[in-house]
Image (cartoon, rainbow, N blue to C red):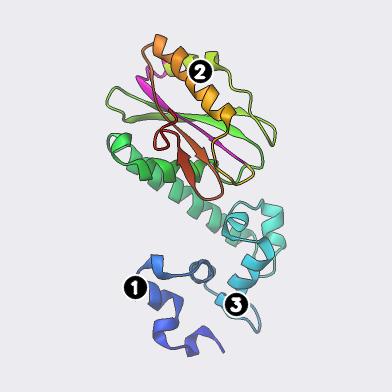
Amino acid sequence: MGINHWAEEDRPREKLLQRGAQSLTDAELLAIFLRTGTKGKSALDLSQDLLNEFGDLRSLLSADKHRFTQAKGLGDAKYVQLQATVELTKRYLRQCLQRGDVLSDVESTRNYLISELSGYPHEVFACLFLDSKNRVIKFETLFHGTINAANVYPREIAKRALQHNAAALILTHNHPSGIAKPSQEDIVITQHLKTILNVLDIRVLDHFIVGDGYGISLMEQDLL
């Protein structure tokens, strides 16, 4: 049975209008994006098949063009649309941060960093450079590592902070394993960077570790 024959309150688009986007499942949200299904399958059926094939929504969104377009019901046009949607989300979150003090809205900071670092198959270390009022100057990915670790160079971080005339920064890196629990090494390098940058009068406000769809703040864990 096609979606048009469902009860109106069960159709993804109508459900979103009545209850809000947060009430929809991943498959329902994806069905709205796809708009149409394939022969014998509704858009919702196709969406569920795709989530089953890729494993989850994150894997689908981060798939490269070749992998994405190999899936039945997808193609170049859908790939372009989806990548544009992902980038729009990143820019929206970035602009939300740029409106004021990032420390006044930890969740916006967390969501933005998750959007930037999720999906990497290897470890990535980045910095969010801030001015004296904790407003965003620039986000930069600085180091790429192996699947387990990134080589972090304090001198390069200090150099970039001075070039941006940053008064403070937030450190961040991902755990490709998907588990964001801080390691002892994470805590040690954070304290080391904090000591070095403090000499230059640059404050380290936090260190976010990004896992699979979530992030942990060392400041919130009293580990900073």
For marks 1 and 3, give the one nearer the viewer: 1
- Percent coordinates x, y for residue 50 in the rendering: 64, 67
Q: Is residue 180 visible?
A: yes
Q: Which range is magenta?
A: 162-175
Cα separation, mark 2 vs mark 1, equals 48 Å
Position of residue 10 in the picture relative to residue 76 (left or right): left
For marks 2 and 1, give the one nearer the viewer: 2
Of the residues shown, which amino acid type is indicated by label 1?
Arg
Of the residues shown, which amino acid type is indicated by label 3?
Asp
Q: Is residue 18 above or below residue 99?
A: below
Among numbered discs 2 and 1, the one appearing first in the sequence: 1
**Residue bearing the label numbered 3:** 45
- CB-based contact (under 8 Å), mark 2 and mark 1: no
Res 19 label: 1
Q: Is residue 40 above or below residue 93?
A: below
Mark 3 crowdedness (10 Å alpha carbons): few <14, some 14-19, many ≥20 = some
Cα separation, mark 1 vs mark 3, equals 21 Å
**Residue bearing the label numbered 2:** 192
Q: 197 or 117, which lies in front?
A: 197
Mark 1 crowdedness (10 Å alpha carbons): few <14, some 14-19, many ≥20 = few
For marks 3 and 2, give the one nearer the viewer: 2
Q: 168 or 184, which lies in front?
A: 184
Query: Residue sitting at 37 percent across and 44 percent down?
Result: 108
Q: Is residue 131 above or below residue 115?
A: above
